[in-house]
Image: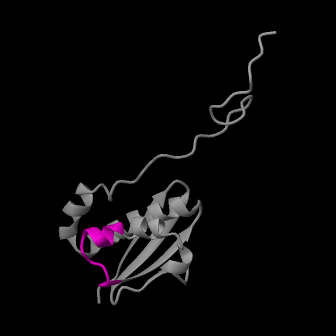
Amino acid sequence: MKVSSATGRRKTSVAQIRMVPGTGKITVNRLPINEYFPIEIYRLNALRPLELTKVDGKMDIICKVHGGGKSGQTGAMQLAIARALCIFDEEMHAALRGAGMLTRDSRMVERKKYGQKKARKRFQFSKR
């Protein structure tokens, strides 16, 4: 039984994945994926690598996710699943690379600057 594990990051979220051949059972932080991500679009985004490589229902996935919000967590989970699939079967690399799933999205929130309301928004300027 081959086990592959991988880590994915997005914004401030980190996802750690363990993937085992099985019946398609997916748990996130010890909850079924339907409970942890009740909104369907999040589940679809997180599981897109499985859909793309036609491995739906053939792998059991155990995922630990922390940090950030749900959107960042789904992105982190997507990257981790794609990396784990590449470790599991090297032939999937080309399909995942072509779909852009093996690229880490490096965009982060810009920090707030002093003397300003937010990162770029400024207080109203008054000439007089």
The reply to whether the magenta stretch includes residue 101 is no
Q: Quadrant of residue 43?
A: bottom left
**Which residue lies at the image location 77% right of the left edge and 10% below the top edge?**
127
Would you say 49 lies left or right of 29 here? left
**Which residue lies at the image location 43% right of the left edge and 63% below the top edge?**
8
Camera sees residue 7: no
Would you say 66 lies left or right of 125 here? left
Would you say 126 lies left or right of 19 here? right
Camera sees residue 34: yes
Q: Which residues lie in the magenta part?
A: 48-59
Counting the numbered discs, the total is 0
Would you say 105 lies left or right of 84 here? right
For the C terminus, give its image quadrant: top right
**Which residue lies at the image location 40% right of the left edge and 68% below the top edge?**
44
Residue 118, given in percent of the width and then of the height, sits at 68, 36
Give above or below for 68 relative to 125.
below
For the N terminus, give its image quadrant: bottom left
Residue 83, given in percent of the width and then of the height, sits at 33, 66
